[in-house]
Amino acid sequence: MDRAALAHLRHELRTPLNHIIGYSEMLIEDAAGGDPAALGPGLRQVHADAQRLLTADQRAAACRCRSGRPRTPVGTS
């Protein structure tokens, strides 16, 4: 994978991860305030960001397969 593609992939992973972190913090605060109805929009955003991460991972896996490199199991480097 060339440097530009790797940089783009890293951006595609970092952006939704930051959203997940921010929204989860907000959801925790909302839950502490006792308003469960306020959680819906945040939960939908968390779901959308998780889908983006899954898609980015699938693209990375496809690139690894085309390059002939084996897939590294999660938690190893």
Image: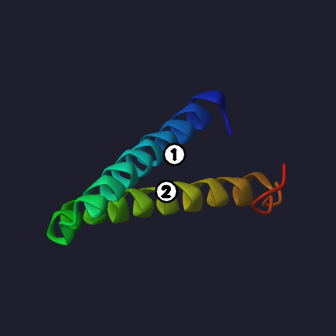
| In front of the other: 54 or 30 | 30
Q: Is residue 6 left or right of residue 75?
A: left
Corner quadrant of residue 3: top right
Instruction: Relative to 23, say whether 4 is above or below.
Output: above
> Which element carries disc 1, helix, strand or loop?
helix
Give the residue at x 35% y 65%: 47
Q: Residues within 10 Å of mark 1 (few under 14, many from 20)?
A: some
Give the residue at x 43% y 61%: 50
On residue 13, the disc is 1
On residue 3, the disc is none
| In front of the other: 55 or 34 | 34
Residue contact at pointers 1 and 2, CB within 8 angstroms: yes
Q: Residue furthest front?
A: 33
Q: Is residue 13 left or right of residue 33?
A: right
Q: Is residue 39 left or right of residue 63?
A: left
Give the residue at x 48% y 60%: 55
Q: Is residue 56 left or right of residue 42?
A: right
Identify the residue under disc 2.
53
Residue 30: x and y in percent read 25, 57
Residue 15: x and y in percent read 43, 41
Among the two numbered marks 1 and 2 on one chain, the one whose residue lies closer to the N terminus: 1
Calculate the distance from the C-alpha at mark 1 to the C-alpha at mark 2.
6 Å
| In front of the other: 19 or 12 | 19
Residue 28: x and y in percent read 36, 57
Inspect the image, locate mark 2, and give the three-letter code of the amino acid beneath it. Leu
Inspect the image, locate mark 1, and give the three-letter code of the amino acid beneath it. Leu
> Which element carries disc 2, helix, strand or loop?
helix
Residue 52: x and y in percent read 42, 57
